[in-house]
């Protein structure tokens, strides 16, 4: 049962006696505490002695309540994933104190895996949610400020696909916003002054298939799967789900908002390094603030999920190699409409320098080939060749989308001009944040 006195306990009141311990924030760095605490340096949150039993107990119980509620609405791939989502939601309430804004990549191989349902739950529990499917970068630039919202982006695969087009600004914003002090500069206002628009904000992105490496590398990754017949969830209905989840959101805000100063000073011990440590640090900070079993659970989730992504990266690299090799084989066959499975396998196995002769126990076979291509939505079909012969085969047109997404040829992308024409500014590179008023294209339009 929720006890309000536990949710608002503050382990580190500032020197002035104000329990909020939150000072001014100019948008360029984490929130600093006010009073004599400023400049005391990083601090560790050791345990109950640092917080008082009431504060630790309240935070740990609140996270447990949040975890249990999230688990009723969605089936996540593992217990570690459920712990990670719980901590990610809580971390959104201390964003002004953070140095990094971890992304939450909610991906699945097909539709119907619960990705959108995860965003529904996040929308009612995170700090200042901003849900969007198709918005302009100009809107996002103006919404993000000193107290940033939590961006929730559904159908994110449409932003990063080969036909993303005018969404390149949004893609650049999402890449830059993982770390503080990465503003987007624009010429803005009636006086056309250079203006820095902040990009720092936590973001959850849901889509089919992996997002680009630049996003996945900055994200806590949830690899969703369809529910098994025996797995049950509570239907999400606004009339009862929203009040329940909003109550948890309000409890999180009451607990964590006064602790932003302590969170900004805390330097946790991390089980990983480099970019993974940057991404997971906010979640571990929240776990340390809560105490109880959460510090150990957070670090266990960090290790398990980052190791899983290392394996996934290796698999993805292998599958990308397979797509490139199959494209080469189709080109050698004059881009035939279809190739028999046995002919495709024979061509793959003849390359002694490829991994395919040693794949599995006896080399790549039809079963392994089908498994490797399944995530791309590619499977063999019955195809009728000349003289009425029918055989299992792979259709070339089934590969076109995967080739464009995962291994585009240089000819598939717009060429980069050798230099600007006289009297014109150079065009912005692909994926960059162009210089110009928010929502407008800077410089000359791209050729089509």
Image (cartoon, rainbow, N blue to C red):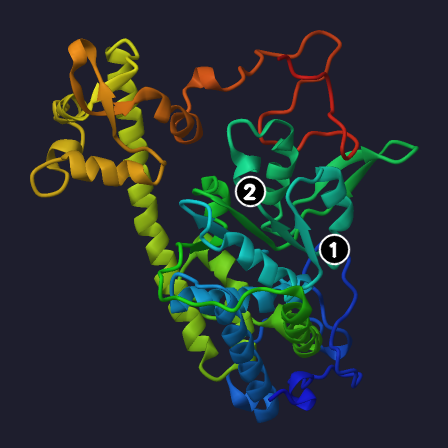
The image shows residue 177 at horizontal and vertical percentages of 62, 48
Quarter of the figure with residue 333: top left
Give the residue number, with chain letter if any, for mark 2: 156
The residue mark sitting in front, 2 or 1, is 2
Q: Distance of mark 2 from mark 1, alpha carbons?
A: 27 Å
- Which element is circle 2 on? loop
Give the residue number, with chain letter if any, for mark 1: 27
Earlier in the chain: of badge 2 and badge 1, it is 1
The image shows residue 39 at horizontal and vertical percentages of 68, 71
What residue is at 57 percent from the left and 92 percent from the top?
A: 53
Compared to residue 446, the image places residue 24 above or below, namely: below
Compared to residue 273, the image places residue 182 above or below, namely: above
What residue is at 27 percent from the left and 18 percent from the top?
A: 338
Quarter of the figure with residue 363: top left
- Which element is circle 1 on? loop
The image shows residue 429 at horizontal and vertical percentages of 60, 25
62 or 175, which is in the foreground? 62
Q: Is residue 205 left or right of residue 37?
A: left
């Amino acid at each position: 049962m929720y006890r309000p006195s536990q949710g608002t306990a503050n382990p580190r009141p500032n020197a002035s006696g104000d329990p909020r311990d939150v000072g001014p924030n100019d948008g360029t760095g984490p929130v600093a505490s006010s009073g004599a605490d400023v400049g005391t340096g990083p601090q560790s949150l050791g345990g109950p002695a640092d917080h008082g039993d009431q504060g630790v107990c309240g935070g740990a119980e609140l996270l447990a309540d949040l975890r249990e509620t999230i688990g009723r609405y969605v089936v996540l791939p593992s217990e570690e994933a459920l712990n990670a989502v719980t901590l990610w939601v809580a971390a959104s309430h201390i964003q002004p104190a953070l140095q990094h804004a971890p992304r939450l990549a909610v991906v699945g191989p097909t539709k119907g895996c619960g990705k959108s349902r995860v965003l529904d739950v996040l929308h009612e529990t995170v700090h200042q949610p901003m849900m969007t499917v198709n918005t302009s970068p100009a809107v996002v630039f103006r919404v993000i400020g000193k107290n940033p919202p939590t961006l929730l982006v559904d159908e994110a695969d449409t932003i990063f696909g080969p036909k993303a087009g005018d969404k390149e600004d949004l893609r650049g914003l999402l890449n830059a916003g993982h770390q503080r002090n990465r503003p987007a500069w624009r010429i803005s206002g009636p006086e056309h002054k250079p203006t820095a628009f902040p990009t720092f904000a936590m973001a959850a992105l849901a889509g089919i298939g992996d997002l680009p490496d630049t996003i996945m590398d900055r994200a806590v990754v949830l690899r969703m799967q369809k529910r098994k017949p025996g797995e049950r969830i509570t239907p999400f209905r606004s009339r009862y789900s929203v009040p329940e989840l909003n109550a948890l959101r309000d409890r999180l805000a009451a607990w964590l908002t006064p602790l932003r100063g302590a969170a900004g000073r805390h330097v946790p011990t991390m089980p990983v390094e480099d970019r993974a440590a940057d991404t997971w640090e906010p979640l571990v900070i929240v776990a340390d603030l809560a105490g109880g079993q959460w510090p150990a659970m957070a670090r266990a989730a960090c290790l398990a999920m980052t190791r899983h992504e290392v394996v996934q990266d290796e698999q993805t690299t292998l599958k990308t190699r397979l797509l490139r090799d199959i494209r080469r084989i189709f080109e050698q066959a004059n881009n035939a409409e279809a190739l028999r499975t046995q002919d495709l396998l024979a061509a793959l196995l003849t390359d002694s320098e490829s991994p395919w002769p040693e794949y599995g126990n006896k080399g790549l076979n039809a079963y392994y080939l089908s498994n490797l291509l399944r995530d791309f939505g590619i499977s063999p079909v019955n195809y009728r060749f000349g003289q009425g012969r029918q055989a299992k085969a792979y259709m070339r047109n089934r590969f076109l989308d995967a080739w464009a997404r995962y291994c585009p040829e240089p000819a598939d992308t717009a060429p980069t001009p050798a230099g600007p024409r006289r009297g014109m500014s150079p065009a912005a590179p692909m994926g960059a944040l162009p210089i110009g008023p928010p929502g407008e294209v800077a410089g000359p339009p791209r050729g089509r």
